[in-house]
Image (cartoon, grey):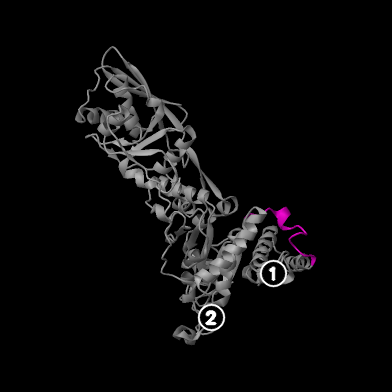
């Protein structure tokens, strides 16, 4: 046999298109030629494969070897094609049986000694094999990354010798064990730790129930970060499709995450020196950024105006669309980024503007320059704007009433979300026609919103965002229609629009 076809997959974002690795051995001067638009690291695989075969006890054919990676229009990068190329050479040269190669998809980078190295993107590649109903063979070190994804037919191998022996029917490989164990998180955080911020706690409960974005404004030490870090404790567990997407994004980015915690919403809190590329994703072959790593979870941006204006402005489209398209010369990638933005900021550079107990040391021009970093269109896309005042000393000493614990709030949030899911979507995603229907909004509520919109010159986006928040407030109260009280509370939670 001088020809063999082995199957593999490329990594294109979180997608994994199938690649046919065709190997042909011909007479003539010995050489190794690779076609199919391979990237530099793929072209270098010929040297790794040659050494790996020799050091594993196999013969490297003294032939003209041609390897075709098809289809040619799929970008190929990295070393994950090494294993399939090596097995293709062994099958084409008759060193292993090639009759059942169509039953397998092989991935993994080879070391010069023939060992398989840890790979990035193992989860998305393994899930893709479900469509073709074949067996995936990946490095054993990457097997744990696929655990928790369901009943996948995935085997792990440590060396090229093990893979060759398994295909020949002479050896057994480690198989992925299904693990449905759910871990109850121990956040070490609870809303009952919060004292003296009933308005802010209520606002975050509304934000959690409807998936709304929120901006907290207050002096240093008022509890903004404390509140934001406790938001994941009141969010419901992710659905299967959601946690698989989130897990694939982490895997593609090369970030390890405990599979047992996949069902928990992620919480990302990047530093304010973050660049625009690191936020949305990028690179020569674009990788997910922070907004995608926060998919189905929370993106907390503390010191909001300290981020560069360019970094903040790239949030505008993802906040609306729930996905980001990154175009580079090497390719175009689309990553999901349906995250919940929680931002926190001081009212001025020193932090004490409008504070009743401490004087502000900033000039009007300094305050204007500080606030100008956040554009009006970006503010317009944030559902809740709330003031977080500094608590009194008596409250800090333990005299104030505690907030409800996270378990109690979470139960209310889940109940409200269940009502929304019966409509087909969370309130933040509810289409404007359905949201504005008489079935969901009373005439009195619509009239009040019209009056405020005319008086405060609210934008159309502000109108619908206020209505979405009001719908969430109504759901928390188990009300069938949005009433005047729900609209009034929603407008109070959009402080920057109505003051």
* Marks 2, 1: nearer the viewer: 1
Looking at the image, is 70 positioned above or below residue 283?
A: above
Can you give x and y, in whole percent of width and height, for residue 296 in the image? 52, 54
Instruction: Give the number of callouts.
Output: 2
**Along the line of sight, the residue nearer the viewer: 345 or 296:** 296
The tag earlier along the polypeptide, 2 or 1, is 2
The quarter of the displayed image where residue 77 is located: top left
Looking at the image, is 361 positioned above or below residue 249?
A: below
Looking at the image, is 387 positioned above or below residue 40?
A: below
The quarter of the displayed image where residue 495 is located: bottom right
**Along the line of sight, the residue nearer the viewer: 317 or 245:** 245
Magenta extent: 429-443
- The quadrant in which the N terminus is found is top left
- Secondary structure at badge 2 equals loop
- The quadrant in which the C terminus is found is bottom right
Name the chief secondary structure element in magenta: loop
Can you give x and y, in whole percent of width and height, for residue 388 in the image? 54, 75
Can you give x and y, in whole percent of width and height, for residue 314 in the image? 53, 53
Location of mark 1 (residue): 486
Q: Is residue 488 magenta?
A: no
Residue at figure coordinates x 29%, y 35% from the top left: 172
Q: Which mark is residue 350?
A: none
Which residue appears farthest toward the top when viewing the image? 28
Q: Left of 455 or right of it: where is 228?
A: left
Residue 118 can be seen in this image: yes
Can you give x and y, in whole percent of width and height, for residue 112 in the image? 23, 34
Q: Is residue 433 magenta?
A: yes
Looking at the image, is 97 positioned above or below residue 398?
A: above
Location of mark 2 (residue): 355
Alpha carbon of mark 2 to alpha carbon of mark 1: how far?
29 Å
Label 1 crowd (10 A; few <14 / some 14-19 / many >=20): many
- Secondary structure at badge 1 equals helix
């Amino acid at each position: 046999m001088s020809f063999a076809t082995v199957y593999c997959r490329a990594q294109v974002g979180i997608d994994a298109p199938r690649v046919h690795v065709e190997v042909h051995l011909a007479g003539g001067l010995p050489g190794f030629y690779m076609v199919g638009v391979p990237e530099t690291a793929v072209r270098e695989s010929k040297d790794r494969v040659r050494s790996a075969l020799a050091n594993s006890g196999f013969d490297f054919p003294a032939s003209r070897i041609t390897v075709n990676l098809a289809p040619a229009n799929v970008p190929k990068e990295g070393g994950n094609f090494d294993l399939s190329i090596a097995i293709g050479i062994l099958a084409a040269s008759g060193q292993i049986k090639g009759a059942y190669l169509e039953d397998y998809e092989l991935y993994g980078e080879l070391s010069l000694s023939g060992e398989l190295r840890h790979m990035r993107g193992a989860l998305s590649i393994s899930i893709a094999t479900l469509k073709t109903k074949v067996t995936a063979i990946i490095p054993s070190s990457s097997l744990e990354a696929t655990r928790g994804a369901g009943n996948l037919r995935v085997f792990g191998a440590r060396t090229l010798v093990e893979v060759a022996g398994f295909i020949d029917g002479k050896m057994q490989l480690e198989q992925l064990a299904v693990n449905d164990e759910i871990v109850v998180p121990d956040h070490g955080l609870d809303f009952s730790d919060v004292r003296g911020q009933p308005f802010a706690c209520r606002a975050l409960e509304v934000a959690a129930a409807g998936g709304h974005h929120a901006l907290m404004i207050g002096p240093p030490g008022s509890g903004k970060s404390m509140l934001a870090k406790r938001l994941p404790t009141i969010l419901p567990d992710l659905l299967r499709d959601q946690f698989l997407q989130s897990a694939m994004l982490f895997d593609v980015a090369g970030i390890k995450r405990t599979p047992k915690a996949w069902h928990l919403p992620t919480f990302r809190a990047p530093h304010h020196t973050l660049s625009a590329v690191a936020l949305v994703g990028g690179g020569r072959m674009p990788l997910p950024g922070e907004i995608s790593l926060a998919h189905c979870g929370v993106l907390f941006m503390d010191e909001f105006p300290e981020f560069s204006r360019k970094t903040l402005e790239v949030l505008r489209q993802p906040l609306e669309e729930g996905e980001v398209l990154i175009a580079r010369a090497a390719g175009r990638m689309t990553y999901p980024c349906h995250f919940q933005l929680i931002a926190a900021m001081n009212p001025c550079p020193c932090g004490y503007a409008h504070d009743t107990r401490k004087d502000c040391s900033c000039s009007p021009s300094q305050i204007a320059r500080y606030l100008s970093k956040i554009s009006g269109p970006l503010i317009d896309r944030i559902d809740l704007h709330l003031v977080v005042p500094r608590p009194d000393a008596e409250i800090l000493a333990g005299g104030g009433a505690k907030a409800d614990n996270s378990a109690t709030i979470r139960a209310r949030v889940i109940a409200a979300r269940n009502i929304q899911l019966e409509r087909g979507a969370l309130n933040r995603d509810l289409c404007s026609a359905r949201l504005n229907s008489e079935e969901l909004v009373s005439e009195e509520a619509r009239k009040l919103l019209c009056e405020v919109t005319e008086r405060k010159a609210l934008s159309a986006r502000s109108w619908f965002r206020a209505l979405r928040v009001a719908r969430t407030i109504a759901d928390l109260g188990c009300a069938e229609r949005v009433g005047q009280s729900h609209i009034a509370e929603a407008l109070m939670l959009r402080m920057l629009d109505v003051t």
